[in-house]
Image: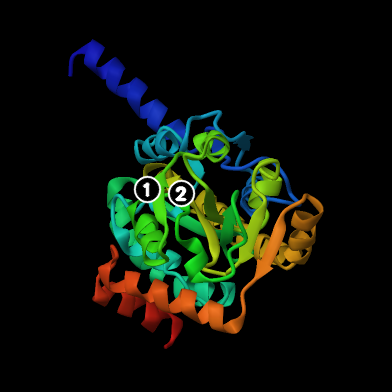
């Protein structure tokens, strides 16, 4: 090997050898609020565990390293170690993760965890994502189950959704809104406040804490506690980074994820007062009758067969829960 090529190869080897020792960057997806954000609880406990066990880590505020798409790209390319992200960000690789968003499918977080860990669905998700450079390290709850927010009127039945245009994450959510008799429009989260104030969108589907955490109660005035699905986001990590760790370092990272999961689930149990906070902020809260809830469930079920998941994939999720 020529001297210059040998020098370049040696330099590259040194860079690669030092990668696992470099500071772990964690891209946050919410304000750094330990009381109001389950996602931040997960990230903060994870970072603290790493730092306390010899793996240096630092949190980067939401948007500092780019939006969701940029964070995903950086993680998949090995340029960013850890990102807090929405579920649908890895569905571009494989849609299996959308099982976690099936409306009225999971009763609670215990069922979610049973499917992911006891039923092996997290491993199944990673079978598709890791070859693309992305590992789903954890699934975190960001609050009680999602409900319906809007700027226009109380929603106490499926029929009340008619005429509303809801902000959607993606086409699968638009399909759900259509099944309810409403319309949907895809709007990035950064544009949501403007969309709600200008009428581009009339509302969104989110857990109860969201307008409180992001300051939307000035224009969001109605909330229906529909309990549609668990409020979930994910932690993605660079597979190159993860596999480049020593056995001891990887054990620390895995233990940090377990500690973060436990803290996140414990935090969920503290969120009983969020509805009262919404009311205090001037948001009218509507509780569904059992009959109205059943109507939402029945309308939502139509999206299963026409959705992005195959019947076989839905059956996998059912088996993982133990149905």
Q: In which quarter of the image is residue 115?
A: bottom left
Which element type, helix, strand or loop, lies under badge 1?
strand
> Quick check: 163 above or below 22?
below
Q: Residue at x 56, y 28 (%)?
A: 64
Q: Quadrant of residue 305?
A: bottom left
> Can residue 21 be seen in this snapshot?
no
**Which is nearer the eye, 207 or 300?**
300
Badge 1 is on which residue? 134
> Can residue 80 be seen in this snapshot?
yes
Residue 196 x/y as whole percent:
55, 40
Badge 2 is on which residue? 236
- How crowded pointer 2 is (Cα within 10 Å; few <14, some 14-19, many 20+) is rated as many
Pointers 1 and 2 in contact (CB under 8 A)?
A: yes
Quarter of the rendering occupied by the C terminus:
bottom left
Quarter of the rendering occupied by the N terminus:
top left
Q: Residue at x 68, y 54 (%)?
A: 209
Residue 185 falls left or right of residue 132: right
In this view, the residue farthest toward the top is: 4
Residue 23 x/y as whole percent:
56, 33
Q: Quadrant of residue 95?
A: bottom left
């Amino acid at each position: 090997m020529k001297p210059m090529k040998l020098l370049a190869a040696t330099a590259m080897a040194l860079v690669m050898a030092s990668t696992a020792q470099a500071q772990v960057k964690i891209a946050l997806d919410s304000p750094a609020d330990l009381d109001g954000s389950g996602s931040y609880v997960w990230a903060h406990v994870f970072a603290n565990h790493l730092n306390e066990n010899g793996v240096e880590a630092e949190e980067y505020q939401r948007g500092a390293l780019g939006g969701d798409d940029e964070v995903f790209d950086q993680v998949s390319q090995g340029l960013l170690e850890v990102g807090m992200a929405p579920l649908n960000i890895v569905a571009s690789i494989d849609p299996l993760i959308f099982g976690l968003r099936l409306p009225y499918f999971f009763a609670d977080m215990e069922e979610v965890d049973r499917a992911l860990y006891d039923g092996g669905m997290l491993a199944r998700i990673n079978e598709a994502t890791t070859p693309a450079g992305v590992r789903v390290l954890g699934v975190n709850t960001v609050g009680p189950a999602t409900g319906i927010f809007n700027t226009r009127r109380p929603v106490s039945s499926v029929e009340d959704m008619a005429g509303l245009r809801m902000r959607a994450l993606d086409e699968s959510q638009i399909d759900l809104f259509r099944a309810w008799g409403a319309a949907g429009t895809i709007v990035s989260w950064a544009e949501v406040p403007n969309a709600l104030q200008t009428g581009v969108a009339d509302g969104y589907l989110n857990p109860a804490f969201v307008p409180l955490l992001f300051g939307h109660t000035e224009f969001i005035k109605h909330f229906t506690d529909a309990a549609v699905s668990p409020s979930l986001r994910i932690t993605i990590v660079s597979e190159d980074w993860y596999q480049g760790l020593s056995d001891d370092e990887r054990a620390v990272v895995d233990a940090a994820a377990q500690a973060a999961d436990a803290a996140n689930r414990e935090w969920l149990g503290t969120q009983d007062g969020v509805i009262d906070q919404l009311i205090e902020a001037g948001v009218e809260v509507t509780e569904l009758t059992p009959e109205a809830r059943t109507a939402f469930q029945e309308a939502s079920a139509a999206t299963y067969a026409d959705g992005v998941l195959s019947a076989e994939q839905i059956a996998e999720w059912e088996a993982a829960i133990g149905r």
